[in-house]
Amino acid sequence: MPRASRTAIIAGFAAIYLIWGSTYLAIRLGVATIPPFLLAGIRFLVGGSALYAWTHLRGAPRPKASHWMYAAILGTLMAGIGNGLVTYAEQTVPSGLAALMVALIPVWIVLMEWLRPDGTRPRSTVIIGLVLGLTGYVLLINPAEIGGWNEVSGWGALMLTLASLSWASGSLYSRRAPSPASQVQAVSMQMLAGGAVLMVLAVITGEFTSLNVDAVSWRSLVSLTYLAVFGSTAYAVYVWLLKVSEPSKVATYAFVNPVIALALGSILAGEPFSPWTLFCSIVIITSVALIVTSRASRAKKEAIIQPGQAPRPGHPAVGAAATCEPE
């Protein structure tokens, strides 16, 4: 494991916690005046191009055609459909609640792994996490309107669920997909592929023709810039942290990010934070923490067999959430 100063590692954790946690609010501010697929498409094309150029300047070898093929599949599932639907949903769903629903990705991954034909039954701790997560999911949507609370629209919940399932599918697929030696390069290729898919969706849904350039606010432009620059930088920081810190510690972003998103949405955007949201948040974040820490513990034991090998995105050690959630 490469050596790095404690200050640098702390700064790296602060970056993935705060940047990825704040991207949900940035998306919410961005879609206020920029169509969602266009916003996400520009974000990933700009960010992906910058990261790809950076890896090229650092001497990364040219990726093979097969790498681009798998990057196209992953980019479509994760950046394209996953992030695209999250961005679309945030037109109506508060950023904090969107982050909370997206945090359930580890739940969907474990269920997919369990229910597949050759699946393995998860450990008892993970099963408890599954039950808590699904309970929190139903309570947050609250179709029966228990107590009169109904804070997530049915349509928004559907979009966020489909986004999470697509991201979870990409996470599982990434475990057997060949990728370049540089993980940052692999991520940049996925971002470019996803950005291209999002641009196609923007054309199909008529976002280019409906865009009113004069109505685009400075807040939306700043948010787009923030997503493209800082959101992409966080990917590189994440990969670096996997090399210099314990993956089980890096995995904590999975349940810290929704806390950051909920706090920022409430403080900076005045999003409602009711007692019902607080209760559902505790249930969901607890479930994710149980799943992530349990799987990270298992992955740490497996890592003893291959010392010094950093886990690929999608490895259990990083919470089975690929490079990050679809924020």
Image (cartoon, grey):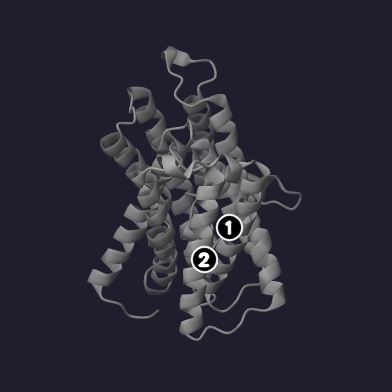
Percent position of residue 232, x then y: 44, 62
Kind of residue sitting beneath label 2: Gly
Is residue 297 rendered to the left or right of residue 118?
left
Percent position of residue 70, x then y: 68, 66
Q: Are marks 2 and 1 in contact (CB under 8 Å)?
A: yes
Residue with the most extreme front position: 214
Compared with 299, 32 (above or below) is: above
User: Image point 61% across, 82% down: which residue?
Assistant: 62
Percent position of residue 75, x then y: 62, 59
User: Image point 47% across, 70% down: which residue?
Assistant: 50
- State the mark number for residue 195: 1
Q: Residues within 10 Å of mark 2 (few under 14, many from 20)?
A: many
Question: Marks 2 and 1, how far apart in space?
Answer: 8 Å
Q: Secondary structure at mark 2?
A: helix
Is residue 271 rendered to the left or right of residue 214?
left
| Residue annotated with mark 2 | 48
| Residue nearer the viewer, 307 or 239 | 239
